[in-house]
Image (cartoon, rainbow, N blue to C red):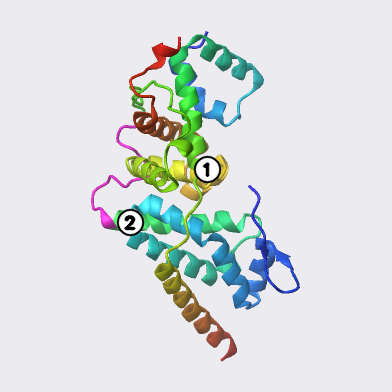
Amino acid sequence: MADFVMETGEGGNVFDDTALVNLARGGDANAFGHLVSRYERKIYRLARHITDSESDAEDVLQETFLKAYEHLDGFQGNSKFYTWLVRIAVNESLMKLRKRRSDRTVSLDEPSDNGEEPMMREVAVWEGSPEEQYSNEELRGILEKAIQGLKPAFRTVFVLRDVEELSTEETATALDLSIPAVKSRLLRARLELRERLTRIFKQKGEDVLAYL
Amino acid sequence: MLTCKEFLQELSDYLDETIDAELRKKLESHITECPNCWVICDTSKKTIQVYKGMEPQNVPKDVQDRLMLALQKKMAAKCGKVKA
Ligand SMILES: [Zn+2]
């Protein structure tokens, strides 16, 4: 994944994350501001996806950048700045979830129905492409609602892998999970979302047999 | 031929293209003969694509303002400590 670069306006210089982090460490407030504007949208989206709450997501957004600023000196240059931010944001988001619910449904470690076969009731092709069938706003609504129907253990993995596009290894590190655990949860999450979306996007009145 | 269950177990890695050529061949021969798995594979691929195509929205203005304010406060406090 290529980080997009930003014009700083100072002689048209373009700084990558590492350069901005170094400047910010040296006390350049603008440099940190650039990092915030580069990633605030993704961090806010991630927090909303995991917490399913706008007010919690706002808290997570603030805490993430405040903590990142505070611990900038502890940031190891050997990981990507964005991955480091995501780790902070994921931890903050999970804390919010755990605080909100006293029961154990938030556990990221052991989904109660682990190992169960995902249901495969909807085997039907889709009607054209969803991007053409729905407005951006409608589509966004459909996709977000489908994600919120997943258990936190599954949706967190899905959001990191398929929305934020972290690698399997980065996801495993961010969530403190093994690679096989990330893979099995990702498969499960993808199949569940496929099921939900197919209910909405399938061709009306047809099933796969019509295509044989 | 692989069973449908075996096929589904490898589906994620197949879609992510992280499997070796030999297994890939087996999976591909399964979907040419099993229409159910073909549809599941196709709609899973589209599910992933549609999520990857989703652009992050802008942070609402009031949320952003409060973030900036919190950061400025933090920075002022940090600078104060260093220079004092
Ligand atoms: Zn099959």
Is A186 one of the magenta-colored residues?
no
Residue plotted at (36% across, 18% down)? A206
Q: Residue furthest bottom?
A: B84
Residue A42 in the image: x percent, y percent? 50, 55
Residue plotted at (72% across, 74% down)? A10
Residue A37 appears anywhere in the view: yes
Residue A147 in the image: x percent, y percent? 37, 42
Task: State which quadrant residue A63 falls in.
Answer: bottom left
Find the distance from the CA under tag 1 to the CA under tag 2. Answer: 23 Å
* The label number, if any, that marks residue B53 in the structure image: 1
Is the residue at mark 1 in contact range of ligand 1, meaning its CB lies under 8 Å from it? no
Is the residue marked by circle 1 packed among few (<14), some (14-19), or many (20+) residues within 10 Å?
A: few
Q: Relative to A59, is A38 on the left or the right?
A: right
Is A110 one of the magenta-colored residues?
yes
Task: State which quadrant residue A113 falls in.
Answer: top left
Q: Chain of mark 1?
A: B
As shown in the figure, which amino acid type bears the numbered disc 2? Ser
Q: Is residue A142 above or below residue A18?
A: above
Residue plotted at (63% across, 78% down)? A27
Q: Is residue A191 above or below residue B29?
A: below
Q: Main SS of the magenta segment? A: loop
The residue tagged 2 is A53
Q: Which residues are magenta?
A: A100-114
The one of A113 and A63 positioned closer to us in this rendering = A63
Residue A159 in the image: x percent, y percent? 45, 45
As shown in the figure, which amino acid type bears the numbered disc 1? Gly
Q: Secondary structure at mark 2?
A: loop
In the rendered image, the quadrant that contains the C terminus of chain A is top left
